[in-house]
Amino acid sequence: MALQTVAPRIRGFICLNAHPEGCARNMQSQVDVAKAYAKDAPGGMGHALVVGASTGYGLSSLATTVFGYGARAVGVAYERAPHGDRTASAGWYNLAAFGRLARDAGHDVAFVNGDAYTDAIKAQTIELLKRRGAKLDSVVYSLASPKRTDPKTGVTHASVLKPIGAPFVSKSINLGSDEVQTVEIAPATDHDIEETRKVMGGEDWALWMNALAEADLLAKGCRTVAYSYIGPELTYPIYRSGTIGKAKEHLEETARALTVDLARTGGAAYVSVNKALVTQASSAIPVVPLYISLLYKMMKAEGSHEGTAEQIGRLFRDHLAPGRTPALDAGGRIRVDDLEMQPQIQRRVFEQWNQVTTENLFERTDYAGFKHDFRALFGFEIPGVDYAAPVEVAIALEI
């Protein structure tokens, strides 16, 4: 037994620990949403693979494919086990809880824990899928990492958050001091742009799909999806028009290339443009926490706010579930950011943007909600959890 009282250890946009009971309750909530959204959906799903399955959109995709559509699923993630007095990562506890819930409900799930960018983990996953007799109906690619080592060259590439062409000056929140500040970020070099493409673009997604195809693990009609974001003009310089945006353009190019091959057997590859949500990655992007805080204030007031579980539940229900035909925009993308981008919502966000100061931050925005959602990612501030009580932190992940 390794009982501990676990309190959050947060530095800026990084949380260094996680609460196992809080993560388990989060997982139960996601499962409940997945079931609700798929209640009236047609048909079932055979096999699913989720690459990047332990947090965020990937975790919600795992919950939706398994509990919504009955898929036999494999999730790939790279998470830290508990060690001594150190808790496991939130993703570890998420998957441990998901595995228990799935198996108790009679679902067939398995996990691979390791660096999904490597050839070794791809090979390990392929061998597992072969042993399970899988022919994949759905492949979700949801990796997010600041670095990636190219398995062909051995070179490690690091992504950067930078504008292109000119410095970027804007408001942002200092997450350490809760102050509204002005940030200035120097423009990217060509090297920065290429580094970010290597990490955040579609190269690894294509490597996964090609490896699965070569192993004859894709069912007829297999559909694969990767996740992206566009956002409003307020965030364009640091996101869509910046280094990350260039990488996401490459992701879209990859989807078109993969579709050429998948279409031969009735399948396709899609990029789903999702809503701005609180994640450890989004918290690291200047301007985005302030934008999200304003956005959530407006969307919650209108009743249109969604979390990751609702976003992915809607994505599959309306676009990717068996029997559904995805609705695409002019760029060939699925758009489940449609509620975020409603003109009246964006107009209100823009109206408030220039009026927000440190003094009125909590009044004019939902920054309190942003902070809550960030802590909740790691199992903290979850209703019903007694954080004063010691909990078992040495929880195994049943692979």
Image (cartoon, grey):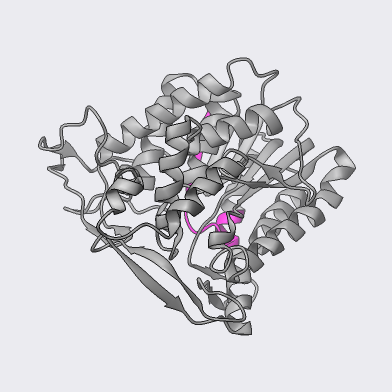
Q: Is residue 248 above or below residue 297?
A: below
The picture quadrant where one finds residue 230 is: bottom right
Q: Position of residue 118 (x, y in %)?
A: 56, 63
Q: Residue at x 49, y 39 (%)?
A: 308
- Residue 120 located within the stretch drawn in magenta: yes
The picture quadrant where one finds residue 265 is: top right
Q: Position of residue 222 (x, y in %)?
A: 75, 38
Q: Is residue 78 above or below residue 55?
A: below
Q: Is residue 210 left or right of residue 339?
A: right
Task: Pick whichever, 71 or 61, lies toward us.
Answer: 61
Whether residue 397 is visible here, answered yes or no, is no
Task: Pick whichever, 223 or 77, lies toward us.
Answer: 223
Q: Position of residue 370 (x, y in %)?
A: 35, 47
Q: Residue furthest top?
A: 40
Q: Residue furthest right?
A: 264
Q: Residue at x 54, y 60 (%)?
A: 234
Report the number of discs.
Answer: 0
Whether residue 110 is visible here, answered yes or no, is yes
Q: Which residues are magenta?
A: 107-122
Q: Position of residue 99 (x, y in %)?
A: 42, 32
Q: Is residue 194 left or right of residue 351?
A: right
Task: Pick whichever, 120 or 21, lies toward us.
Answer: 21
Q: Residue at x 20, y 50 (%)?
A: 8
- Residue 135 located within the stretch drawn in magenta: no
Q: Residue at x 41, y 26 (%)?
A: 101
Q: Is residue 274 above or below residue 256?
A: above
